[in-house]
Structure formats: structure tokens, C-alpha cells
Amino acid sequence: MAKFTITSDFAQNFADLVYKTTGYHSIVCDTTGMIIGDSAHTRIGVIHAGSKKINSTAGMKEIAITSEEAANNSSMKEGVNYAIMMDNEKIGTYGIAGKLEIVKPLVKMAA
């Protein structure tokens, strides 16, 4: 069976859908951690450190950034990044920025 990959069109449509339906910005990354879908349309092609870590760490499926962590690092936003799985294999990640108590359930529903 051929390995499934996330297309940039799908990634962008997904990120846009999350933003339009929830009001929270989101990203979708490929297996290298590169952002391939961005609801803000500003970071396509940027390597996302959290996504890269999820994809390169066995067993890791989620990273949450707290408001305190985001306040101490201007390149981070509060929110959650989660692995996209297909046939028990990570095929990318997606993340939603916002208050953890709100976006964490949203990310889990989309999973």
C-alpha cells in the first residue's frame, strides 16, 4: 500500500475550515514539521518546532504550549499541536492556537 501524504491543498482547506468554524487560527504541518496549511496565510514553508518534535519522537502525539510559555517566548503561541495518524503512522500534525482549556478539546475532536 502506498504511503498516504497530506497535500498542501487539503492542509490549507483544513486550516481554513477550522478557523471559519471556530474562530481559532490553525496550522497543518507535513512530516518534516514544515507548515503546509495556515489559516492566517503567513507561515507557509516555515518549520514548526513543536511539529518537528512530535514527528521525530516515537510515541509523542501532542504538545501543548501554556500561556506562560508563550509569554516567555515571542515565537510561541498558546495552543495545542497534535499528530495526524493514518494506519498507526504519523503523517503530519495540526495545531490550534488559543486558550488550552478551549482548543485542547477541539484538537481531540478533529483527531
Image: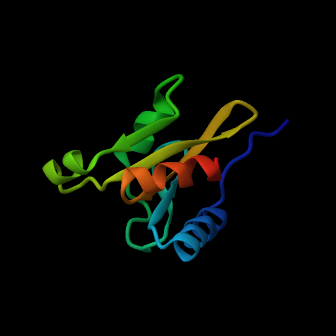
Q: How many marks?
A: 0
> Please, which residue is most extreme toward the top here?
58
| Scheme of image coloration | rainbow
Residue 69's x, y, as percent?
22, 45
Q: Quadrant of the N terminus?
A: top right
Q: Is residue 67 left or right of residue 43?
A: left
Q: Give the vertical position of 7 relative to 108 (above or below).
A: below
Give how far across and how far down residue 53 sits, in percent: 41, 35
Residue in the image at 63% along x and 70% along y: 13
Query: Would you place residue 83 above or below residue 40 in this image?
Result: above
Can residue 47 be spotted in the picture?
no
Whether residue 98 is visible, yes or no, is yes
Query: Which residue occupies the extreme right position in the image?
Result: 1
Q: Residue furthest left?
A: 72
> At 52% from the left edge and 43% from the top edge, which residue is drawn?
82
Residue at the image point whose x is 49% and y is 28% from the top:
60
As drawn, is 50 to the left or to the right of 74? right
Q: Is residue 75 above or below residue 24?
A: above
Q: Name the spot of residue 110 as percent of width and height, x first.
A: 63, 53
Across and down, in percent, residue 72 comes to 14, 48
- Foreground: 58 or 106? 106
Residue drawn where x is 44% and y is 74% of the image: 41
Nearer to me, 81 or 109: 109
